[in-house]
Structure formats: structure tokens, C-alpha cells
Image (cartoon, rainbow, N blue to C red):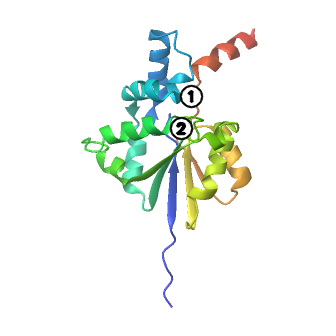
């Protein structure tokens, strides 16, 4: 009897895992203070403009290229903006090979997936993962936000988590934190 190879799934967060997003969004928030902060992530038109300026994280894209298995993106940002970003980089000299391995984009943004609108990103990701992981024996989650890990592990204790870098301080929260310390 031959043992079949395990089917492996890699689920990648986009913002600040595959791309330097906070940097780009901070730039836009300063340049266009009249646009609400969340519009940079959720508004289909604005999110597409903001994502253009978002630089890839090369180490993570090298992993997408190298790691065997199926690769998906599960993002809190508007899904069409992420698809737009990927489309523009399919032939990129440095990350194109990795980009072409991405088999799909799922989004917890209320605009893209209204049924998870009331859950927030972390719980929305945990819910969508039930469908995404069907048929796979081994699931790896790549993210930068401990809140996402916590919510996902609560519902999917079998997954393997990978935090690629320490959580960056979000511009809107750092202000609150600094004030609280005084
Ligand atoms: Mg993130």
C-alpha cells in the first residue's frame, strides 16, 4: 500500500504579512485626512488606490514561491483590491513566481463578504477557514496579528501558526496608548 502525500494548505494574511501596508496607509492618512481611516481597507475604489503604493515583503513572497502546497490569501482588506495588486505583479521580476502560485483570495471585509460583516476580522477569518481548509490534511496560517491567531486557534486547534515578524504598532492605536501611559 502506498501512503499518499499529505495535502498542505498555506493561508496568508495580506496586510503587513505579504506587504508593508501600515506604511502605505499612514502615508495616505496624512495626505488625505478627510478620508476615514477604514476606507483605505474597505472602500472598493479607495482601497484600490491605496494598495498600489503598498510594497511587497520579499522574504514572505520567497516562502510562497518555495513552500510546497496550495497557497491562498485570507485578508481583512477589500478582496478586489488585493486581486488588483496581485494582477499588477504577476510578471514582477522578484515576486511574480510567488504571485502566480496564489490560488485564491478570500476576504472578511464587510464589502466583499457581507455574511461575516458583524464578526470583525479575526472571527471572520476563523469562520471562513472552515470552508477554505476542506480537503487539506495540514493547514499553515501566516499572519502578523495575535488576535487573528487567537480566534483561529479557538476554532481550528489543529492548524500550525506562523508569525513572521513582531506586530507593528498601528498608527491610530499608538496615539491612544501613548496618552494612556501618562
Ligand atoms: Mg495583517
Label drawn at residue 100:
none
Q: Position of residue 117 (x, y in %)?
A: 65, 37
Label 2 near label 1: C-beta < 8 Å?
Answer: yes
Structural crowding at the residue carrying mark 2, measured as other residues with C-alpha within 10 Å and reported as few (<14), some (14–19) or many (≥20): few
Residue drawn 30% across the image and 50% down it: 97
Residue 18 x, y percent position in the rendering: 45, 39
Secondary structure state at the residue bearing disc 2: loop
Horizontal side of residue 98 vs 163, given as left or right: left
Residue 18 sits above or below residue 3 on the image: above
Q: Quadrant of the C terminus?
A: top right
Determine whether the beta carbon of the residue marked 2 sits less than 8 angstroms from the nearest atom of ligand 1.
no
Residue most toward the bottom?
A: 1
Residue 147 pos. (x, y %) = 68, 38
Tell me what residue is drawn at x 33 percent, y 51 percent.
Answer: 100
Camera sees residue 148: no
Res 165 label: 2
Q: SS of the residue at dot 1?
A: loop
* Measured Cα–Cα span from mark 1 to mark 2: 8 Å
**Residue sitting nearer the eye, 96 or 144:** 96
Which label was assigned to residue 168?
1
Residue 20 appearing in the image:
yes
Give the residue at x 47% y 52%: 72
Q: Nearest the camera: 143 or 163?
A: 143
Judged from the image, the quadrant occupied by ligand 1 is: top right
Q: Is the residue marked 1 within 8 Å of ligand 1, measured from its CB?
A: no
Counting from the top left corner in percent of width and height, residue 88 is at: 30, 38
- Disc 1 crowd, CA 10 A, few/some/many (<14, 14-19, 20+): few
- Which residue: 58% across, 64% down? 134
Amino acid at each position: 500500500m502506498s501512503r499518499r502525500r499529505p495535502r498542505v494548505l498555506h493561508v496568508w494574511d495580506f496586510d503587513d504579512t505579504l506587504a508593508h501596508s501600515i506604511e502605505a496607509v499612514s502615508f495616505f492618512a496624512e495626505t488625505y485626512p478627510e478620508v476615514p481611516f477604514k476606507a483605505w481597507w474597505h472602500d472598493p475604489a479607495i482601497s484600490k488606490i491605496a494598495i498600489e503604493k503598498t510594497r511587497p515583503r520579499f522574504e514572505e513572497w520567497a516562502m510562497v514561491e518555495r513552500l510546497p502546497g496550495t497557497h491562498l490569501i485570507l485578508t481583512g482588506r477589500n478582496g478586489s483590491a488585493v486581486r488588483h495588486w496581485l494582477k499588477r505583479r504577476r510578471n514582477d521580476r522578484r515576486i511574480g513566481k510567488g504571485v502566480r502560485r496564489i490560488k485564491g483570495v478570500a476576504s472578511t471585509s464587510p464589502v466583499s463578504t457581507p455574511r461575516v460583516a458583524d464578526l470583525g476580522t479575526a472571527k471572520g477569518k476563523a469562520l471562513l477557514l472552515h470552508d477554505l481548509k476542506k480537503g487539506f490534511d495540514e493547514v499553515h496560517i501566516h499572519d502578523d496579528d495575535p488576535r487573528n491567531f487567537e480566534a483561529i486557534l479557538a476554532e481550528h486547534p489543529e492548524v500550525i501558526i506562523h508569525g513572521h515578524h513582531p506586530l507593528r504598532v498601528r498608527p491610530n492605536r499608538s496615539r491612544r496608548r501613548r496618552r494612556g501611559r501618562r
